């Protein structure tokens, strides 16, 4: 990923990334009560070994580091299939972990194999550049206010993406708005620039635009870029 050709160095206030999980292995999963293929697309088949997966993660994180402001932060969503590689890659590329957010899903799909516990969580890592000279942005008081006056904890509970949010089209790993709304509010201010290097259906862009932030979205699938554009066109820029 050559972000330097598309984005100015040290110009981004916050990055949200939902990279490939590399789960497309011809298996099956459950969706809306039906058994369906686990394959998500060619974009989810790139790495076949642990070494290839980790090299991929280090490469895109290195590119993100180059465009992130010294005061900026990065959020990365993932499951057990890739998140541990990402956590190590973050430290190897000069980031410092701030939080390990657990997103607890209230309506996860059932476990068809019945050989382990039902997968009902995803992890969202939050990190900053490992530089003591600069302080990262965290809107602590706002998060406290949105949590009935109490400190917000690192376990966020809620449902999967609603059908209403998929009205313009579907993406297999689309995140719900309430997750991105919170991330945007927690770590950016009005007019800040947000980057999503794997923008998919554009949820990050919708949250950013509605909150009055600027947004840059990148994806290798043109259909998803079209979907992102349609969704963002329905949102008025925040005041």
Image (cartoon, rainbow, N blue to C red):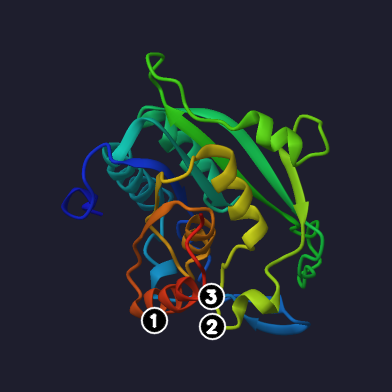
SS class, disc 1: helix
Neighbours of disc 2 within 10 Å: few (<14), some (14-19), many (20+): some
- Say left or right for 101 vs 111: left
Determine the CA span between mark 2 and mark 1. Answer: 10 Å
Name the residue rendered at 81%, 32% in the picture. Answer: 149
Neighbours of disc 1 within 10 Å: few (<14), some (14-19), many (20+): some
Compared to 145, does 124 lie above or below? below
Q: Which residue is mark 1?
A: 223
Q: Is residue 101 visible?
A: yes
Determine the CA span between mark 1 and mark 3. Answer: 10 Å
Determine the CA span between mark 2 and mark 3. Answer: 7 Å
Discs 2, 3 touching: Cβ within 8 Å: yes
Which corner quadrant of the image does residue 200 belong to?
bottom left
Q: Quadrant of the N terminus?
A: bottom left
Q: Which residue is mark 3?
A: 171
Which disc is residue 169 wearing? 2
Discs 2, 1 touching: Cβ within 8 Å: yes
Name the residue rendered at 70%, 73% in the picture. Answer: 162
Q: Give the x, y percent position of residue 115.
A: 79, 62
């Amino acid at each position: 990923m050559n972000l330097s050709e598309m984005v100015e160095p040290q110009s981004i206030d916050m990055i949200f990334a939902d990279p490939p999980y590399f789960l497309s292995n011809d298996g099956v999963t459950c969706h809306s009560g039906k058994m369906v293929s686990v394959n998500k697309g060619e974009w989810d088949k790139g790495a076949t070994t642990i070494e290839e997966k980790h090299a991929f993660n280090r490469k895109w994180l290195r590119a993100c580091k180059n465009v992130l402001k010294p005061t900026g932060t990065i959020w990365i969503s993932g499951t057990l299939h890739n998140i541990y590689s990402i956590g190590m890659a973050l430290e190897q590329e000069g980031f410092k972990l701030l939080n390990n957010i657990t997103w607890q899903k209230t309506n996860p799909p059932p476990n068809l194999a019945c050989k382990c516990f039902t997968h009902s969580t995803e992890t969202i890592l939050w990190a900053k550049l490992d530089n003591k000279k600069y302080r990262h942005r965290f809107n602590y008081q706002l998060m406290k206010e949105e949590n009935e006056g109490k400190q917000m904890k690192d376990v966020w509970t809620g449902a999967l993406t609603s059908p209403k949010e998929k009205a313009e089209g579907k993406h297999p790993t689309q995140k719900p708005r309430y997750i991105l709304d919170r991330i945007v509010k927690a770590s950016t201010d009005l007019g800040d620039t947000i980057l999503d290097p794997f923008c998919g259906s554009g949820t990050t862009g919708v949250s950013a635009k509605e909150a009055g932030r600027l947004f840059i979205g990148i994806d290798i699938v043109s259909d998803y870029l079209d979907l992102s554009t349609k969704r963002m066109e329905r949102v008025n820029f925040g005041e």
